[in-house]
Amino acid sequence: MRTRGKVRIRRLLPESMPGLDIERMDFPAGSSMTGIPHTAGTREYLTCERGSLELTASGEHYTLAPGDVVVFRGDQKHGYRNPGPRACVAYSVIAFAPTAG
């Protein structure tokens, strides 16, 4: 497990899978985190399990409630914020673009 500010992030795969990361993110009330843009062509899938989560990606704003899913370009600036009074749990699936090789 690692932390970015107050947000706890835990990888959900016991071993590395080429081109794929799956993470659980725990956001305390009022916390936020800036995402790190990935390689060109990367897509991210974000779902909210509990609480409320705001996503800003490529200048667009999304508010996710439990069960909501959004897909966005992971190679752009993005950030997350829990606007609610309670903790939020979200999951991120990062599908990295294939690399030339």
Image (spheres, grey):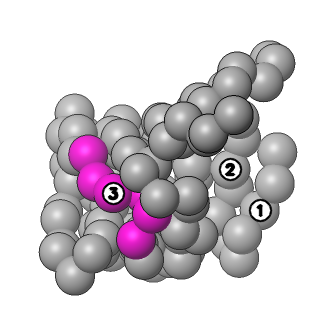
* Image disc number at residue 11: none
Mark 2 residue element: strand
Please say whether residue 35 is visible from this viewpoint. Answer: yes
Question: Which quadrant does the N terminus fall into?
Answer: top right
- Residue farthest front in this picture: 101
Q: Nearer the viewer, residue 70 or 48?
A: 70
Q: Amino acid at mark 1?
A: Thr
Which of label 3 and label 1 is nearer to you?
3
| Distance between the alpha carbons at the discs numbered 2 and 1 | 6 Å
Tell whether label 1 touches label 2 (CB within 8 Å).
yes
Residue matched to label 3: 73
Q: Amino acid at mark 3?
A: Arg
Q: Sequence-wise, which precedes: disc 3 or disc 1?
A: 1
Please name the residue shown 69% across and 34% down the image.
101
Residue range highlighted in magenta: 71-76
Left or right position of 15 against 79: right
Estimate how packed mark 3 is, as few (under 14), some (14 to 19) or many (20 or more) residues with alpha carbons within 10 Å. some
Q: Compared with residue 28, is residue 97 higher up or lower down, i.e. above or below?
A: above
* Image disc number at residue 3: 1
Verify whether residue 40 appears in magenta: no
Residue matched to label 2: 9
Mark 3 residue element: strand
